[in-house]
Image (spheres, grey):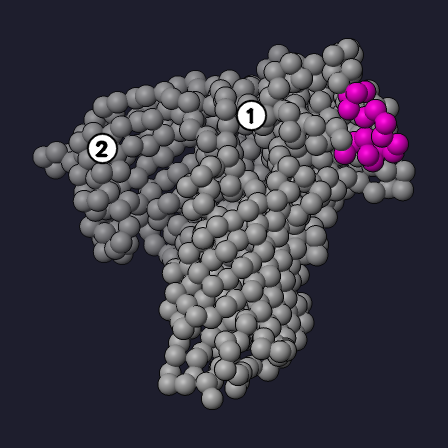
Amino acid sequence: MIQATWWKFCKSSILFINIFFPFYLEAQSWTELQTQYNGYNEYIVEESQSYSISVEKDKLKVLSDNYYESVILSDTGIHNNQESFVYSQLVPLQSFEAYSVISQNGKEKKIPVSKVVDVPLDQRSVFHSDVKEKKLTFSGLHVGAKKVYKYQNEFIDPYLLHKFIFNNDFPATQHKLEILTDKEVQIGFKIFNDPQHLIQFSKTEKKGKNLYSWTLKNNLPLKYEEYNPGYLYAVPHIVFYIESYKSHNETFPVLGSVDLLYNYYRNFTKDLNIEEDPNLKSTTLSLVEGLQTDEEKIKAIFYWVQDNIKYVAFEDAYEGFIPRQAKLVYERKFGDCKDMASIITEMAKYAQIPHVNLTWIGSRNIPYTYHEVPTPAVDDHMIATYETPSGQIYFLDATDSFTKFGLPSEFIQGKEAMVQNGSSYKLVKVPVVNPENNLTKTHIRLNLENTLLKGNASTSFDGLARSKYIALLGDAQHKQRHEILKSVLELGNNKFQLIDFKENNIPNKDLPYEIDYQFELDNYAVQVGKETYINLFLEKPFKNFTLQNDRTSMVDFDFLVNLEYAVLLEIPEGMKVSYFPENLKESNDLMDYSINYTIGDNQIRLDFQLALKKLMLKKEDFSLWTKSLNTLKSLYNESIIITEP
């Protein structure tokens, strides 16, 4: 990922739902808060950030003062004795103070924290980062005690001002952001997820400076909901930035337009790959030798980078923004997203493939467009793009080692991208991969022995479904691989036994990943007298994907699925089918599905197809989704009946 800025780590990526209640801390003791917020272990008295932006020696100086104060409401809350904050080379720590406030003999007493530890921020996806976490351990806590900490950062790069989140894990009196600027400084901001306009804004003058203030009072934490697209889609927050400043009557633009953002990004790429690397060039020319078209050549380069350059994320000051030279990436055989984009574009240049460019993009957990937020907050990723003479654009994200050429990676679908083209750029939208390209196909042949089903089956995964499951399996071997595949292929119920399997086409990204397997399901069929009941829906897609009536967060799917499911049951000798359900075909704005039963010589076959049509469901889609799913679940429960004479 390309952002080294520390703000992306400040909040959890779990989504919650915002609920507001009026109350006033000033009129309440902690005992009253205990009653009012029963079930919460802590209550936030104040969480705030105050920025000072001034012009000193013709340059911007940005300081940020952060304050947090909370009160313990329960015995469980006493054990929550740690807090932390982060800093980095680009946002260094200037000072901090932390202490507990306890009641002793009817008076309040400050107790310094008992332990302070600086550790690298734990990011499992990042190999190396300069972002540090300062962990504070509070002592002397009891119910009614307070935790207080405050610290000051300096923003070395004024382009990297970030967002402020008006929420936390606990109820709060208020979340507040203040920005104090010299009159020569102009700022911009945009508020998200405040439909009722509960965030109070004011602009006043203070000692000859402009004071901007945003406050949200009396809000409860957001409730977790599964399958959400990320907390930035729901949590009230503000993105702010410096538009310009004046010095000696000259105006210096900073941010506020896409053009200015691109000019900022260009500083990070202007010195990239100026000199040729003979070794990389030789490898490239050997790789594309004999290939006739540019499309064939860029495909070969893309697959080579996927297979030979290991993705390792770095976030170290400006190294989180600046792509490394292709020569270094080639020698190391590893790099982050920017480095992979760098080597792809350089190899394309050696192969004389035109219109292969560096491209900035935000992943799907970022909800902004470039025009909404023309700041570095809109991006957290870099890829390469190839544009054909006809104008078709291929999005080349080599950080996903398993996605085939021609498809974007799952986490950039539908996003806007900024494609570099020398001194200019263009904004393009990444397509959502059609469900037809993400086909999962399962064919099952069943034999019934009393109540035991024995099956021979084949399942194939294509497109982003292929990428998902090959990534899930990774390098697992033997028993571990068997267990993972069992969970992926499980049919019927938890009595499913995977007897044997064979995998095909793992190395060839252009072919579906296939698994041929044998399985058994004991006690699956139900015998009642001379009748045997068998549900041929051994797999019931989205059966448990029920949305609660009070859900407010959107629903985000990884990708649009297309499922083809065929089950052929051999009718035991001497028995016949006495009942099978009716066929049905439905289509609406969210999904298409069809169910078809056919009877042949001593066989009955179920063909089922289902395709999703929307990558993200909004609240107005919930009713149709629930209706469609309820219909499907009733159909899933239908069984065929075979009867002895």
User: Does the magenta stretch mainly form a helix, a strand or a loop?
Assistant: helix
Q: State the residue position of label 2.
A: 101
Q: Residue pushed farthest front?
A: 573
Choose the circle earlier in sequence order: 1 or 2.
Answer: 2
Viewer-nearest residue: 532 or 587? 532
Q: Is residue 549 above or below residue 359?
A: below
* Disc 2 residue type (three-letter): Val
- Quarter occupied by the N terminus: top right
Quadrant of residue 132 within the rendered picture: top left
Q: Residue at x 82, y 34 (%)?
A: 296
**Quadrant in which residue 370 is drawn:** top right
Asked which secondary structure carries label 1, the reply is loop
Residue that numbered label 1 is attached to: 312
Image location of residue 237, percent across then percent down: 52, 44
Does residue 569 show up magenta in the picture?
Answer: no
> Percent x, y for residue 50?
47, 31
Is 172 on the left or on the right of 109, as rendered? right
The amino acid sitting under disc 1 is Val
Residue 460 higher or lower than 359, as above or below: below
